[in-house]
Each structure stands twice: as C-alpha cells, then as structure tokens.
Amino acid sequence: MKKKKEKQEAEVQQYTKGSVIVQIIMTVAAALFIAPIFIIFNYSFKGKRELYLNNPLSLPEKLNFDNYIAAYKKLDLATTFTNTFIYTAISVLILAILCGTTAWAIARCRRKFFKFCYIYFIVGILIPYQALFLPIYMIGYRMHMTNTRFGIIFMYVATGISFGVFLMNSFMSTVPLELEEAARIDGCSVFRTYFSVVLPLLKPAMATLVIMQAFQIWNDYLLASLYVSKKQLKTLTVAIQSLFSAQSSDYTTAMAAIVISVLPIAILFLSLQKYFIKGMTVGAVKG
C-alpha cells in the first residue's frame, strides 16, 4: 500500500509539473499573439509625434479620436465599409445555402456522379485561386462582371465553394440517417427534410463555415483589388492599403481603420463562438 501511495504521489507531482510547463508555454504564446493587437489598438489613439518618439507598448498621453475621424474621411468608410459588409454577407449566405445542400446530396447519394462531384470539389481546394488570377479575370472581363457587385460576389462564391462543400460533407456523418427516413415516412418532402431535420443539426458546421468564409472575404485584398477599380465599389482593405505608399504613410490613421475593420468580425466570432468550438471538435472523440 505504501509503494502504491508513493507511486500515486509521484504521478501527481509529475502531472503538476507538466501542467505548469504547459501553462507557461501557453501564457508566452498568448502574450506573443496579443502584443501586435495591443500595439495596433494603442497606436490608433496616438498622435504622429508619439508614433515615432514613444515606445510601441507605452500608453498614449491622451485618447486621440482624431485618427478615427481622419480614417472615416480619408477612406470614405461610409462607402467602403458598406461595400465590404454587402460582399461578405451575401457571399457567406449563398455559400452556406449551396455548400450545405450540395454536401448533403453528395453524402446521401451513392452514385458515381456524386462521387465524381466530391472529387471535383476536392481538386478545387488543391489549386489556390491566387494562381488562377489571369483566367479568373479574363472570364470576368468577357462576361462583363468586373467593376460590378454581382461579379465580385460571384467570384467569392466560386472560390469558396470547394472548401465549403468539403467542410460540410465531413459533418454529414453526425446527422443520423434514421431521422431523415422517419421524416420521409411522415410525408416530408426533400426540401422540408433538409431545412427542418438536417439543417438544425448542422448548426456547428454552419457556424464554422460562416466564420471561416467571413474572415477570408472580409479581409480579402487580392480578389477585391483585381475585380474592382471603381472608387464607389472598393472594399475596406483596398482603401486601407491606399494609406501606405513609397513616399509617405499615415500609420496612425491606418491603425484606426484596422481597429474599425476588425470590430464586425470580432462580434461575429463572439456571437458564434459556442457553435464554432463545437464544430471544430465534432468527431474528435468517438463513443
């Protein structure tokens, strides 16, 4: 009994030491991630003199909201922010509808055609859309979709649907097939079965898809700069880039604009955080 007790105490001590080491590593990693965010938020309230003379981690002498006013005027935030919100919201909504229904059809149908479709979408993930900019632009130009809201939304949907179908298809195994069979016996149509039975069970997957695609589209610069040249259609990220040039850069205004651009995505993540974490851990533990 004494040896057993000593062994248990040794295991507890070893576990405690390992836990302390993990906590220290996680604290250091968290500090490294938080530091750039803190510096951006800190600089957004500093004046230009403080930007070059003071330490990046030092607090501003006073809260200077002039940077936010300058960002609103220089970047025309009323237009660029609205454009970015429209592109992101509509694209994510379309992706959620298309990816969910497509993945459901692929998961439930065993025909070779649907297997081929799934492989086709997987191939789409392996080829980054950044490598296809020339053909993407040529197709958009010939179809008169450049410098149009419809064109940029269409391209966001086209470049995001492969990953969306792959993500949603992996979650379809968590939906019991018996529920769908019971719904059909009760007389539910295909559409009602999906929207009333399948879709409510896919909330974690949908939240994961919405957050990841919203992050990508909201912060996208390459596709937005390629497809949009009209000032009234530009996005927030493209407008922020205009503050940086080879001759001069307005860092304080840019920091304020970055803080403003982060807020909607942060609110979205906090709203769907519970479902997002659940969606990322589904299938990690069996039994």
Image (cartoon, grey):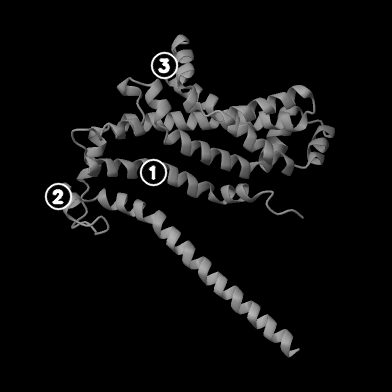
Image quadrant where one finds the N terminus: bottom right
Name which of mark 3 and mark 2 comes first in the sequence: 2
Is label 1 in a helix, a strand or a loop? helix
Amino acid type shown at disc 3: Thr
Residue at figure coordinates x 63%, y 78% from the top left: 12
Q: Looking at the picture, does residue 16 appear above or below residue 43?
A: below
Locate residue 57 relative to residue 138 in the image: left or right. Answer: left
Ranked by sequence position, the earlier of labels 1 and 3 is 3
Q: Nearer the viewer, residue 190 or 130?
A: 130
The picture quadrant where one finds residue 255 is top left
Mark 1–mark 2 distance (CA, rounded to whole Å): 25 Å
Residue 175: x %, y % from top left: 74, 42
**For residue 262, which numbered disc appears in the image?**
1
Identity of the residue drawn at 31% across and 49% down: 40
Q: Quadrant of residue 105?
A: top right
Residue matched to label 2:
49
Per the rendering, the mark at residue 213 is none
Labelled disc at residue 146: 3
Q: Amino acid at mark 2?
A: Arg
Residue 228 lies, in percent from the top left, at 37, 21
Secondary structure of the residue carrying numbered label 3: loop
Task: Give the residue furthest to the bottom.
Answer: 2
Q: Residue 176: which quarter of the image?
A: top right
- Name the residue furthest right: 185
